[in-house]
Image (tube, coloured by chain):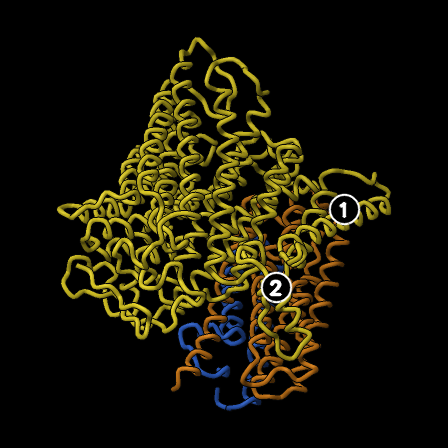
Chain colours: A blue, B orange, C yellow
Amino acid sequence: MPEPGLRGKLRLGYIVLGALIAIKIAEYLVGTTIPNGVWPFLTILALVGAWPILYYFMHINQLWHPKSRHDE
Amino acid sequence: MSRATTLVINRLTIKRLGLWLFILSESFLFLALLVVRFYLQGVQRPTELNQPLGFVISGILLLSSLTAYRGESAIAYGDEKLFRRNILFTLGLGILFLVGVGIEWAEGFRFFPPASGFGTVFFTLTGFHAFHVLTGLLALLTLVLPGQKGRFTPENYWAVEGIVKYWHFVDVAWVFIFPTLYLVS
Amino acid sequence: MTFWRLGIIRGIVVGLAGSGLGMGVTMLLRIALGLTAWKAGPVTAVGTVVGILFYLAGLGAFKYWLGWVRRRAAEEPQATEPTQPHWARYLSFDINHKTIGIQYLVTSLLVIIVAGIYQLIARLETSQPGLQFLSPNTYNSLVSLHGIMMLSGVLLGIAGMMNYLVPLMIGARDMAFPRLNAISYWLTPPAVLLFLFSLPAGGFDTGWTAYPPLSLRAPLGMQLMLIAFYLVGWSSILGSINFLTTIFKMRAPGMSLFRMPIFIWATIATALLQLVFTQFVGIAFLMLLLERLTGLGFFDPDKGGNVILFQHLFWFYSHPAVYIFVLPGLGVISEVVPVFSRKPLFGYKAVAISSLGIAFGGMIVWGHHMFAAGMEEWLRVPFMFTTLLVAVPTGIKIFSWLATMWLGKIHLETPMLFVISAIVVFLIGGIPVDLYIHDTYWVVAHFHSTLFGGFVFPMMAAIHFWFPKVTGRLLDERLGKRYWTVMTVGFLVTYLPMFWLGLNGMRRRIADYDPALGLGTMNTVATIGGYLTGLAMLLFFINLVVSARRGAPAPANPWHSQTLEWQVSSPPPEENFVTIPQIVGSPYGYGIPGSRHALIPMSSQPPEEVS
């Protein structure tokens, strides 16, 4: 995070959402254009899409890096 | 660090661990449902399934995750106005998502009724997920009133954090359900 | 005091009202949709669910959170008024872990008695060939209820032991989430009630496993059982969240992972299994319920379903469930053996890790229940292999107990006697079961031995061991030993004939069998054994009740144990520890001069030095 404080966090949110939407579009294109055998790609894309939510939105690393304050 | 502060900090990590364990347990529920989908139906998918609509409601849910994140970040820095606005946005987007699911269901009843092979799987997965969305919405609703009264501060906003985490989890579940139902073939 | 102040009374009254409301609204809705007003399945299902929510609200379970939403600062709810007698807290929404532990244990014992009585009735029927006094359907309903209620009773029993002991053993004042803990408990009384109503509502003749398609056609009793077990399942999921968080975050200073008593290790393994796998049986039962109520086609091949799916989901939970049932019991054995042998537990680290080993091994063996069910052929060998693998950590434990007893100063008091029975019986239960004897009495005898060895005898050891701590009074040792004798003999007389019966072709879940098979005598012997066990339980309850009222006052540490719960008064103070203890060593340093597990500053009595 280059920019500290609330502004930086809000910006990070937009970046994460952008990435998530990009993954969704990729998923959608894969699912609608390729007729069959797509499930391995979709699995990978779903895992890739779940990680930013877990990491940036849900702060999963708080579990192994407990911080004294709420911020992270 | 005095004894009292250590205890307060522990309280927060305790609550976090508890919530994560709950989320872990719930994710196994969704895992079981995904397994059911593949066990019963393989990768079959009826052509009547409304893929564009599914895509749109996925986008709505992702967007609601962003607003929830913004709400949590705002209260962490004490910006109450931004926090309240974003919680309301999240509620609105969540309701919009449920409306989308409702439209899907209306179509589903025509093309693949619940008693058919794909219908069983489709209505179960979307139904369980919609139930989680509904509980998430109810939980978010409990934040509105205390939020108006200014009860949350940067030092004490566990309720917001916990409920927002649950909301993100509902989104993560959909990240897996959407391709499983709409895209595999 | 007024009755209305008791949480359970409020819960029942409000719950019944809510249930009536739910049924009424459903019937109105059905009329509005142009259906007949009354259809037992959906109407009672909605009534049950709404009733349970109202019951929890009436009990006061949501009071704190509702207060939180409405008010600025929520105050701690007071479960009982000071004017009420002390027993009132056991019938109210109380959040102290010791109260909840006792509530769990009492409920568990009640459920086990009822389930036992059901089986004693059914056993009388099978003691001779021919139909005596039960119809085959009633017989099967009784046996099925016996199964599912015993399992629920066991789940409640282990939850009770863990609730009472975990905070005390790790030096915490309470569980991590006391209110959630109370909710976990209070989900179970409605479950018990539903189990009891199941028989009048037609029962269910499917066996406790509830395999479709039979369970889809079974009477209303089936539905009550499904909801009831679903409640018990959620109770154990919420409970395990609580145990894991408590153990990971609230241990007393100095208690590293390898200074925890083995019972705590067992709790971790049990809770992990419950947390993850209960969801699978939950979803399987919910799918059955949905298919019964709404006609979704999970298990109906005509609608694209598959009955084997249920068995996979079901055994994916129910095999780990066996380890859920026995792991706490094995933990209790590991606690009792060193105390009564006056020697450190042999191979502490191996035993600690083996609990987790059993848990992880137990996750991948479910298929051996389905060898005869038409499961995919290629899965057989892997399941056989994994099943053999689980035996390794179990073996580690047994050798550790034997090595601990070896050359120890063994004191043969009642808890130790039960532990010895448990080890022997558990070994009998380990005799492998083969494809050819699937669905015979061999299987019945096999899993009852495992459960007696892994749960019943250890739980009895636990009750005799910790009773002085819980009540502050000693159990009658003479009666205890008599009870042990009758119980062990009763067990052997019941189940040894069953092994023989199984090999000679006696099938499970049948009310009648061909006299020409010549199985009558052994069946009679088994029945006599069953009633002996019942007699033993009667002795046990007499001992419990009489000793709790008139037993000799117990000192804080009657068995000279080192673990933390014995270092506080009997019964423990409301907050467990006035000052949080400091852990300085192993919990099992018996016979080692100067060995100490904990230092308790400023407590009323110094921690005991053990020789």
Query: Could you tell me how far apart the alpha carbons at marks 1 and 2 are, in whole angstroms?
Result: 44 Å
Q: Quadrant of residue C502?
A: top left
- Residue C73, given in percent of the width and then of the height, sits at 62, 78
Q: Nearer the viewer, residue C406 or C441?
A: C406
Horizontal side, residue C440 vs residue C77: left or right? left
Depicted C265 relative to depicted C486: above or below: below
Depicted C522 relative to depicted C120: above or below: above
The residue wearing badge 1 is: C23
The residue wearing badge 2 is: A28
Q: Quadrant of residue C607?
A: bottom left
Q: Quadrant of the C terminus of chain C?
A: bottom left
- Residue C140, given in percent of the width and then of the height, sits at 55, 27
- Residue C326, given in percent of the width and then of the height, sits at 37, 45
Q: Chain of mark 1?
A: C
Of discs 1 and 2, which sits in the foreground?
1
Mark 2 nearby-residue class (10 Å; few <14, some 14–19, many ≥20): many
Query: Secondary structure beneath disc 2?
Result: helix
Q: Residue at x 67, y 77 (%)?
A: C71
Q: Nearer the viewer, residue B166 or B66?
A: B166
Horizontal side, residue C568 vs residue B180: left or right? left
